[in-house]
Image: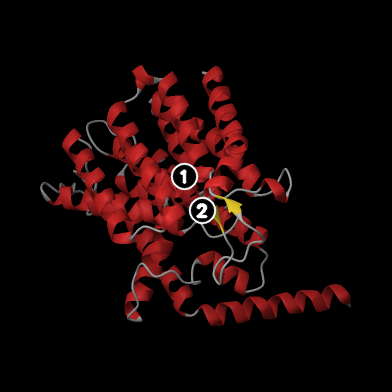
Amino acid sequence: MWQTFLAVFCVSFLALIVMRPVAEKIGLVDKPNFRKRHQGVIPLIGGIALFLGNLTFYLLEWQQMKFPELYLTAVTILLIIGVLDDRFDISPFLRAGIQACLAGAMIYSGLSIASLGQLIAPFSLELGAVGVVLTVFITIAIINAFNMIDGIDGLLAGLSSVSFAGIGILMWLDEQYTLAYWCFGLLLVLLPYAMFNLSVFGAKWKVFMGDSGSTLIGFTMIWILLLSTQGQGHAISPITGLWLIAVPLIDMVAIIFRRLRKGKSPFRPDRLHIHHLMMRAGLTSRQALAVIAFGAALCTTFGVLGEIYYWNQWVMFICFIALFFLYSYSIVHAWRITRFVRRHKRRLRRKQSS
């Protein structure tokens, strides 16, 4: 297996170097604007590197994967649509429609949300036909959750790595080694992008993920969660799955509710995501990344421990709802929180200077 891991890392790393001049030539770059305050034009090739590294794993482990043709067809479509969106800015309704069609293909193949587990103990919530609608809705939601959270350097790679690591650990403990290896392989696919995105090799080599990469990550996440939380002998309970992706999911839902309450389109971008609020409070982008990634790691750890020690699912569900409302309150009262953080930082500076 180490040969496979080495191969996916090398393919992802080399793709980021080879595709850079191609992206600059065809205009597949991100330019600064009123929302994007980076310096210069940045190639949007992280998604292409992620796709090629992931494809390498699939080709090398083809016999062990479930529904390989369907998955690779779906992510290829998402890559093409994502690249076109990065280059030409496609309508969000068209993208959502394509994502819904891919969710329908998953349902047809047998991957869907059939049960929510014992959220109302001791009863198991079986969904029946409702599960079809919920699968489509959740697929679109998770894809766009990871798309919307990609706002500062390293954040998308960090949060998705935390989620894949949590799933991989649970799969390993349940002896579902194929899914575990895939999750760990995805960490190695993401590592080169994180290094380039965080300018480890210098600012001139910086790259962004782009919608092609964020949608691919979101689709892969829901695909793996469906494989691991549904069906006979599933290794992860559905509520644990929510804890594994808590930060991007809660951030997206809270932001959409806030936009709708203000009469704005839920697809209209703004600067009210968690990373924006932290930077407004005075944190640097690296500090915000560290705080958010640490919070995501805590949520994932809570979910992993809950699964290992068989905590009551309804208790974990109530805790998740409480976390959501706490976050929503923080968004609504962001000005109070940012003022408190700034005041606290000023006090620390005074003490250090005295």
Q: Residues within 10 Å of mark 2 (few under 14, many from 20)?
A: many
Q: Which residue is the site of mark 2?
A: 296
| Label 1 residue SS | helix
Closer to the camera, 99 or 28?
28
Who's the residue at 47% across and 48% down the image? 300
Mark 1 to mark 2 CA distance (whole Å): 8 Å
Looking at numbered disc 1 in the image, what kind of residue is underneath it?
Ser
Using residue 19 as the reference point, say whether residue 70 is left or right of it: left
Using residue 17 as the reference point, say whether residue 306 is left or right of it: left
Residue 121 seen anywhere in this rendered image of the structure: no
Who's the residue at 69% across and 77% down the image? 344
| Label 2 residue SS | helix
In which quadrant of the rendered image does the C terminus lie? bottom right
Looking at numbered disc 2 in the image, what kind of residue is underneath it?
Ala
What percent of the width, then of the height, locates residue 129? Answer: 10, 48
What percent of the width, then of the height, locates residue 161? Answer: 52, 43
Closer to the camera, 226 or 123?
226
Using residue 100 as the reference point, say whether residue 22 is left or right of it: right
Q: Residue lying at the far right in this picture: please name it.
A: 354
Q: Which residue is the site of mark 1?
A: 163
Q: Residues within 10 Å of mark 1 (few under 14, many from 20)?
A: many
Q: Earlier in the sequence, mark 1 or mark 2?
A: 1
